[in-house]
Image: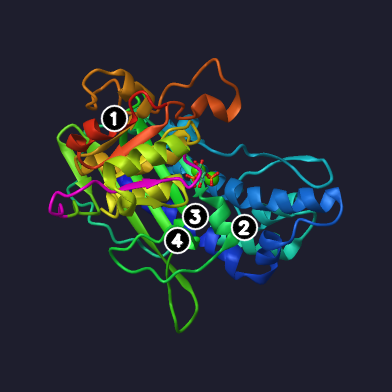
């Protein structure tokens, strides 16, 4: 498992490099921010490019993990499909080839022949990332790769990634939107039970070097299985036990906002972009809980950060199930799992967290949240 963790940290860093390159290299950046004007073909092409950054990152992760752990190859899933239609209506399957040149040629066919953009992307995909320091020595978990599956969100909070507003982060402060909300999320779950067991989060735009103008990223990881609970982040010190702080999506329902304002007070309610980023805020202690009343997140959004919360003693529950249960406390039945689709649904919807969710560090805080929401949804 330590091998797998080291590999995931490496591929997440490579993914972060690709995400940064798309913003830093002019020919790629032009494609990313181009106004959606002009004829239909142009509109479609720009839309394609935005998806292409996601698809390329996901395929790169799938490729690298599949090479080192072939037993996992059929169990690496993600938000994107690698089937791609270019502006000319041709269908292209995006894969990472064995050489940079081949990958560049394939990408050029998706990018309507834009060789400069294709080469820049291929270069980032085939480049070795800087070594990631993580103290994983001695990490022994009795699981083998053949028991595991992976969920990838190549870029979460895409809208923030594309908008690209830069914030100078300060420790202990929650900055609700901006480039730093964009995250690479790689979560590992147990195929038999769906329990999330290993998670890697890379924040590609954590810090901008004032001298060179280059962005540096930050990574976070966790492993949680049986008695092994290890996390790159330490459990934030509990405050003086005052009112709960809650982070929500700005598009959250009014009834939920009102119910939680009554519980916590308006000053303890915060809003932030990105499902992954909001769970990261709970991990870092910037908020106590993240409440979402709708099925607008997916397995690839929650799997990786869920593990870090579990390693810190918390978790992520299905809100609808929790509201139905009499105790209001999390248990085996209410924690989100990652192995079973909603078979009656179609496409991505099969893998949505349909009941909404609550991410928490401390389960003793859940009953009051459930109490405030009971009968309101
Ligand atoms: C999105 C992204 C959005 C989030 C939505 C996710 O993923 O994280 O920001 O909405 O739930 O599915 P909100 O910010 O309102 O919480 P993606 O960017 O990968 O589509
Ligand atoms: Ca997402
Ligand atoms: Ca995404």
* C-alpha distance separating marks 2 and 1: 52 Å
Which image quarter: residue 249? top left
Asked whether the residues under the numbered discs 3 and 4 touch, taking CB atoms below 8 Å apart as contact, a structural biologist would say no
Furthest residue to the left? 240
Residue 165 in percent (x, y) is at: 53, 66
Which element type, helix, strand or loop, lies under badge 1?
A: helix
Point out the stretch of residues depicted in magenta: 237-252
In reply to whether residue 248 is colored magenta, the answer given is yes
Numbered label attached to residue 15? 3
> Is 292 or 26 nearer to us in this picture?
292
Q: Which residue is mark 4?
A: 180
Residue 14 in percent (x, y) is at: 47, 57
Q: Which residue is mark 1?
A: 370
Residue 292 in percent (x, y) is at: 41, 37
In the rendered structure, which disc, 3 or 2, sits on the residue that comes first in sequence? 3
* C-alpha distance separating marks 3 and 4: 15 Å
Q: Is residue 328 above or below residue 135?
A: above
> Is 349 or 98 nearer to us in this picture?
349
Q: Is residue 253 above or below residue 53?
A: above
In the rendered structure, which disc, 1 or 4, sits on the residue that comes first in sequence? 4
Q: Which residue is mark 2?
A: 100
- Quadrant for the N terminus, please: top left
Kindly report which numbered mark, 1 or 3, lies closer to the viewer in this rendering. Answer: 1
Q: Does any atom of ligand 1 lie closer than 8 Å to the CB of label 4?
A: no
- Residue 163 appears left or right of 267: right
Furthest residue to the top? 344
Which element type, helix, strand or loop, lies under badge 2?
A: helix
* C-alpha distance separating marks 4 and 2: 29 Å
Q: Main secondary structure of the magenta part?
A: loop
* C-alpha distance separating marks 3 and 2: 16 Å
């Amino acid at each position: 498992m330590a091998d797998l963790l080291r590999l995931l940290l490496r591929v997440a860093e490579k993914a972060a490099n690709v995400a940064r390159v798309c913003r830093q290299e002019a020919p790629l950046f032009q494609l990313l921010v181009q106004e959606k004007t002009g004829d239909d073909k142009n509109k479609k092409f720009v839309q394609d490019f935005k998806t292409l950054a996601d698809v390329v990152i996901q395929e790169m992760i799938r490729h690298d993990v599949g090479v080192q752990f072939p037993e996992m190859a059929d169990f690496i899933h993600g938000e994107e499909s690698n089937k791609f239609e270019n502006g000319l209506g041709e269908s292209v399957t995006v894969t990472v080839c064995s050489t940079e040149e081949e990958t560049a040629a394939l990408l050029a066919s998706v990018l309507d022949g834009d060789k400069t953009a294709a080469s820049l992307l291929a270069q980032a995909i085939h480049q070795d990332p800087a070594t990631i320091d993580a103290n994983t020595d001695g990490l022994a978990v009795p699981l083998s790769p053949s028991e595991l599956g992976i969920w990838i969100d190549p870029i979460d909070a895409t809208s923030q990634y594309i908008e690209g507003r830069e914030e100078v982060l300060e420790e202990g402060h929650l900055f609700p939107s901006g480039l730093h909300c964009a995250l690479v999320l790689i979560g590992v779950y147990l195929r038999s039970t769906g329990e999330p067991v290993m998670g890697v989060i890379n924040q590609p735009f954590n810090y901008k070097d004032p001298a060179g103008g280059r962005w540096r990223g930050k990574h976070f990881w966790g492993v949680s299985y049986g008695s092994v609970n290890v996390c790159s982040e330490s459990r934030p010190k509990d405050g003086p036990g005052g009112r709960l702080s809650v982070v929500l999506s700005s598009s959250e329902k009014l009834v939920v906002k009102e119910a939680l304002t009554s519980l916590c007070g308006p000053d303890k309610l915060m809003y932030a972009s990105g499902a992954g980023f909001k769970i990261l805020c709970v991990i870092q202690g910037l908020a106590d809980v993240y409440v979402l009343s709708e099925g607008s997140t997916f397995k690839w959004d929650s799997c990786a950060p869920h593990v870090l919360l579990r390693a810190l003693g918390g978790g992520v529950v299905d809100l609808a199930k929790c509201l139905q249960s009499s105790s209001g406390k999390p248990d085996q039945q209410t924690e989100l799992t990652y192995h079973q689709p909603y078979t009656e649904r179609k496409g991505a919807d099969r893998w949505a967290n349909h009941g909404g969710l609550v991410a928490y560090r401390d389960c003793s805080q859940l009953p009051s949240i459930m109490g405030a929401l009971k009968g309101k949804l």
